[in-house]
Image (cartoon, rainbow, N blue to C red):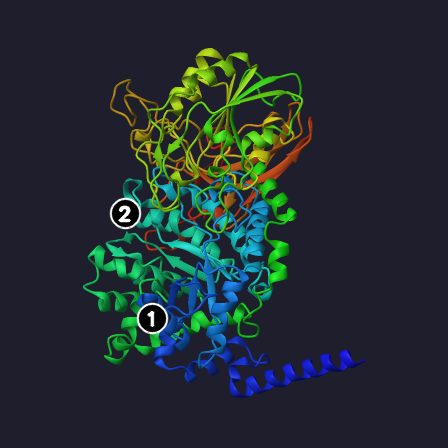
Amino acid sequence: MKNKKIITIGVFALFTVGNMNAQKKPYLDKNKTIEQRIDLLLPLMTLEEKVGQMNQYNGFWDVTGPAPKGGTAELKYEHLRKGWVGSMLTVRGVKEVHAVQKIAVEETRLGIPLIIGFDVIHGYKTLSPIPLAEAASWDLEAIKRSAAIAADEASASGINWTFGPNVDVANDARWGRVMEGAGEDPYLGSKIAIARVHGFQGETIADLTKVNTIAACAKHFAAYGYVEAGLEYNIVDMSNSKLYNSVLPPFKATVDAGVRTFMNSFNTLNGVPATGNVFLQRDILKGKWKFDGFVVSDYASIREMIAHGYAKDEADATAKAVIAGSDMDMESYLYVAKLVGLVKEGKVKEALVDDAVRRILRVKFELGLFDDPYKYCDEKREKAVVGSKANNDGVLDMAKKSIVLLKNEKNLLPLKKSGQKIALIGALANDKNSPLGSWRIASDNNTAVSVLEGMQQYKDNQLMFEKGADLTVGKISFLDEVIFNTTDKSGFEAAKTAAKKADVVVMVLGEHGFQSGEGRSRTDLNLPGVQQELLEEIYKVNPNIVLVLNNGRPLSIPWAAEHVPAIVEAWHLGTQTGNAVAQVLYGDYNPSGKLPMSFPRNVGQVPIYYNKYSTGRPIDSDKNVFWSHYTDVEKTPQFPFGFGLSYTKFDYKNLKVNKPTFAKGENVPVSVEVTNSGNYDGKEVVQLYLHDEYASIIRPVKELKGFELVNLKKGETKTITFTLTDKELGFYDNDGDYLTEPGTFKIMVGGSSDKGLESRFEIKE
């Protein structure tokens, strides 16, 4: 009874303190709406405190140790204690987050909590496949679960905001950040963007109050995926038609899904850096789309407007960023240094500051940080959640679904489970670090399951491993250029000896995990180092090769596509890489992935994408050279968007549109029968493509407008039905207005963008 009395007194004491806080700080009153609470808080804030909410600092000292002395670290620490910091990034772990949050909540005048951001791109510590690989699954529920696993682990470690999803549409594989997005198609990209936002945040904004969700951030706004020459941080120059129809739809989808933050991009658009672009941030995002969350700059991008030649100096960059709608300054140090003075001088209206602060506070209230600043600081939960078996099982499921079978001849796959001699060759086959991918700053090195370890689980075959050659030389880290082995072939002979003894050779080749990602543009999309030579040497002694690709972007592999009988696109699959690859190779999982980006025949075709526009001379009608083609290679991709094989076979028949003509605004039903005619149960991504044959603005030769992932048992037939509405039939004009026009439309339904059953219908006024 004595203990019970103490507990009762403790609860009463907390309740009383809560009431007192609500009286002293009325914005802590939970009975008021969020907007009312913001209305109560804003007038209490000094201009310096308002600007502080717009200031984000990177982690700058060992927060569980003594206060920093000297330099910028001491300055940032003093800003934190004054309430001049609204957010911090890369602070992670319950102890660290609790320490900085305690300063913000208990040592500042108003006690406004921090929002803690982190790059949770494809997992926190337990890593899922890179986003481009996840997109290859075309499985929206699996992608949503993957984001939810990432949110669960990140939130358990004190983080409440991720800088994802990346929804940049990109069709140039030279750009390293294609690994972060969903590929080349705006329709698929929009669906995946919604799935990821809901995975991170929950289905509604109200779900942000849950302890296992985090605020999402749509990035990079906008057109970063179209940097010229695939060169990182380069300029972008594009038409309004491309902007409205290809770039913006996934961003608009995230707004409709309730995403709470946006990040602007490093590139220019129409000659203006995105960070200072009124058209993008004020006119479209906050104006036309009515986005009520906040916009954060990319890392130091406000300051970089000076290097662009757009801003004269620091004060000019600050003013232009705020006026354009950049609400929070990530690591430029300019808002906190310059904005108060600009407001007092009348060069920036305080109303713009108030608008930005209101947006930032709104998200903090939605996360429940004012009600419980330490809600993400539970060490027991951190220990139980991070790296749990359930999370590992989840990322394994995602990894298997992300694998794409590109070629399978000579019945090499699936491998037999007994009685085979298998030579496993390639440095990447025994690599536990590279498969983790590029964005894994919270994970630990060498924690991936290697392909060798995965295949060793199947014990009834004779497995021989030989490295063949090192892939890289020297130091490997997130901040350093990867240097490849181009000379050492000393392991070739041992690999050839193993290959000669084998019934089947499995070669794991491709890119290192740090060869794609931010700052990793390439002009050569071939296998790096001596890998191509190793592949050809092994082929000479045993052509029964299964090539397993580990990569973060489409590669150019024309020789392998012609000679190697089996090719498996396995990307960078994260923590459970080896188990996923082994289960697919041995047939315990029937591959069902489809490419979200076209694979070029060579880098000279890049950018290459399926939803291209027809030229005036698309085909050779006169049997001469004057038509749209290359003289040295086919103009088609090596492997097209939407392509992917299975261990079984799917047949399509009876494509039907229920009538030839429809009135404008009328829905168009489309159906097709799909049969699993092979020897395995399997999954097929049934894809519907549309072509508007004539329009006021020319339309692509085909556009994805529907897909369904269908499970079919061996011999089973299902009828798949799509409904085309104005949303699928229309397009944006050059002013950003959505149009649906009468005309003739061609549809194609199949298992890839390159072929399928075709039909037509007409829309009349």
Q: Closer to the camera, 270 or 627?
A: 270
Considering only order in the chain, which callout, 2 or 1, is on the residue closer to the N terminus?
1
Q: Position of residue 609 (x, y in %)?
A: 39, 36
Q: Position of residue 64 (x, y in %)?
A: 48, 65
Q: Position of residue 718 (x, y in %)?
A: 66, 34
Q: Nearer the viewer, mark 1 or mark 2?
A: 1
Q: Closer to the camera, 123 or 95?
A: 95
Residue 452 shown left or right of residue 280 in the figure: right
Q: Closer to the camera, 189 or 68?
A: 68
Q: In this figure, which residue is indicated by the disc labeled 1?
A: 75
Q: Quadrant of the N terminus?
A: bottom right
Q: Are marks 1 and 2 in contact (CB under 8 Å)?
A: no
Residue at the right extreme, as displayed: 1
- Residue 449 vs 103, above or below: the answer is above
Say which residue appears at 44% left-offset and 22% top-offset. 468
Q: Position of residue 24 (x, y in %)?
A: 52, 87
Residue 659 visible (yes or no): no
Q: In this figure, which residue is indicated by the disc labeled 2?
A: 234
Rounded to the nearest whole Å, what is the CA distance between mark 1 and mark 2?
33 Å
**Circle 2: residue type:** Asn
